Image (spheres, rainbow, N blue to C red):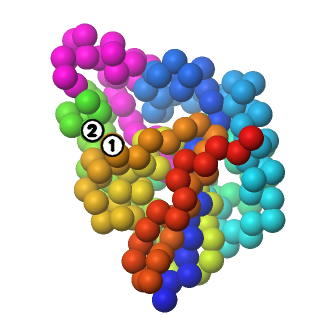
């Protein structure tokens, strides 16, 4: 029976996450609140032993990982970078919908960016790289890529990720129950 658990850690708040702007490849840092959220993650993760720690190459995820106390052992993993939003980088869904009524990131995706299938392929590669791991792994990354990774973990299509809300500075745990991949806990925000 598998003994693997994946701890998904979404980075702390940024200016753009606060305003609802799509933040893909923009390499922005944490706000003061985001830094406090990352320090709260340090307390919440204290005592956990991780066989592997992976982090997105983007600054907001690396800052969160560092402040949470895992920067020295984390492996930068390009496949954990956030979805490339192309032309929609920095725009809110409401702004995009003024131009494209009814638009959803989970349906049509971004113009000039990655397709949801491409992000799903990256998520699958991350999971394949952890396949033989026994024990816990921590993944410090971003809202959409972690949601898509969860959908792939559960055997759902990548757009199944639309069903999983994920707050900044949150911890979620994927694991097994009776040999079946499950969500063990979701969207826990330490105080």
Check contact, mark 1 vs mark 2: CB within 8 A: yes
Query: Could you classify mark 1 by the number of other residues whose Cα lies within 10 Å: few (under 14), some (14-19), or many (20 or more)?
Result: some
Residue at the spot 56% in from the left edge and 81% down from the top edge: 3
**Residue at x-position 43% and y-position 68%:** 182
Quadrant in the picture for residue 94? top left
Does residue 126 appear anywhere in the picture? yes
Position of residue 72 relative to residue 170, above or below, is below
Which residues lie in the magenta part? 80-103
Q: What element carries label 1?
A: helix
Instruction: Confirm whether residue 140 shows in the render.
Output: no
Q: Quadrant of the C terminus?
A: top right
Say whether residue 133 is magenta: no
| Residue 150, percent from left and from top | 42, 57
Write the residue at 74% across / 57% down.
45
Q: In this view, does 82 lie to the left or right of 57?
A: left
Between 140 and 160, the one lying in front of the other is 160
The question of residue 86 being in magenta is answered with yes
Is residue 46 rendered to the left or right of residue 149? right
Horizontal and vertical percent position of residue 85: 36, 31
Tell me which label, 1 or 2, sits earlier in the chain: 2
Q: Nearer the viewer, mark 1 or mark 2?
A: 1
Position in image of residue 4 (x %, y %): 55, 76
Q: Which mark is residue 181?
A: none
Give the alpha-carbon distance from disc 1 to disc 2, as whole Å.
6 Å
Q: Where is residue 81 in the image (x, y as percent from the top left)?
A: 49, 44
Which mark identifies residue 162? 1
Q: Which residue in the structure is indicated by mark 2?
A: 106
């Amino acid at each position: 029976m598998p003994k693997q658990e994946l701890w998904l850690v979404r980075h702390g708040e940024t200016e753009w996450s606060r305003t609802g702007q799509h933040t893909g490849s923009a390499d922005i840092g944490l706000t003061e609140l985001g830094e406090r959220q990352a320090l709260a993650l340090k307390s919440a993760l204290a005592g956990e032993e991780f066989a592997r720690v992976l982090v997105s190459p983007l600054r907001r995820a690396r800052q969160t990982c560092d402040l949470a106390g895992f920067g020295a052992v984390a492996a930068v993993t390009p496949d954990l970078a956030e979805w490339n939003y192309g032309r929609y980088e920095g725009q809110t869904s409401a702004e995009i919908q003024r131009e494209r009524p009814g638009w959803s990131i989970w349906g049509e995706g971004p113009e000039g960016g990655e397709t949801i299938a491409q992000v799903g392929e990256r998520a699958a590669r991350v999971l394949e790289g952890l396949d033989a791991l026994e024990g816990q792994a921590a993944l410090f990354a971003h809202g959409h890529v972690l949601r898509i990774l969860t959908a792939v973990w559960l055997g759902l299509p990548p757009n199944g990720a639309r069903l999983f809300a994920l707050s900044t500075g949150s911890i979620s745990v994927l694991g097994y129950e009776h040999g079946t991949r499950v969500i063990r806990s979701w969207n826990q925000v330490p105080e």
